[in-house]
Amino acid sequence: MSEFLTVICCSLLTAGALAQPITNQSSRRLSEATITYSVAIRTTNTEPKAADLMDGAINTVYLKGNMSRSDLVSSLGRQSTLVDAKTGIATVIKEYGEQRYLINMTPAEWKGSNRAYDSVRYQYTGLTKKILGYACEEAIGTWGSGNSYVVYFTRALQPVNHEFQYLNRNLPGLALEYHAVVGKNELIYQATRIDFDPVPQTIFDLPESGYRVMTYEESKGGKQ
């Protein structure tokens, strides 16, 4: 189950040339905010799977300058990903019952774990919808050999730090809804709230005890 949650965290053109982007709305530089996403899942599996336990999960993203923290909380447990966009250093904190891990990642390891998403290219369909009052455009992102996902983003909010959603880092705006496909499962992230109040610096503090500290290579090897 923890492996599935890890995939989700690190874990979403011709028509694009013809579509006209929404330009009649002012944009806001987004350097500090708390964004809450609900998570729903669609699956073709007829038997209960670990993925089903993701339905109803909450993903809370904290942004403050170069720092970001993404907390994904579900019935499986909690997984947090902290990234310093200035240094490129990332930390993943896993909490599954009594099992607690803190995984340190170098800049090269962080980029390597997300390398597949560096090649994402967007097709803008021209379709629009409103989410939380923001006009959003639909885009289809594709990468690799046939991988794709649907995303709705607003140009009204321009994140200073794009590392918190690596899949969406090349969008010209903030993703407020996206459909990430993992195997036979489709996870739908939709923003339900954006809070522009200051984010406490302590949000980005790492725990000093109670966790097994591991390197990224150790975590990949499945050592317990």
Image (spheres, rainbow, N blue to C red):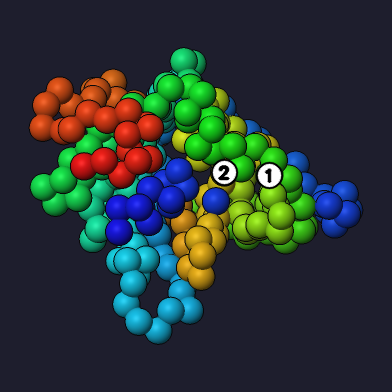
222, 159: nearer the viewer: 222
Dot label at residue 217: none
168, 45: nearer the viewer: 45
Q: Give the residue pinned by disc 2.
A: 167
**CA separation, marks 1 and 2?**
8 Å
Kind of residue at badge 2: Leu
Report helix, strand or loop for mark 2: helix
Q: Is residue 127 positioned above or below 114 on the image?
A: below
Q: Give the residue pinned by disc 1.
A: 120
Q: Residue at image x 69%, y 49%?
A: 143
Residue 222 quadrant: top left
For the residue carrying disc 2, how many other residues have a C-alpha within 10 Å: few (<14), some (14-19), or many (20+)? many
Report helix, strand or loop for mark 1: loop
Residue 22's x, y, as percent?
74, 47
Residue 75's x, y, as percent?
23, 60
Residue 207's x, y, as percent?
18, 27
For the residue carrying disc 1, how many other residues have a C-alpha within 10 Å: few (<14), some (14-19), or many (20+)? some
Horizontal relation, residue 217 to residue 139: left or right: left
Kind of residue at badge 1: Val
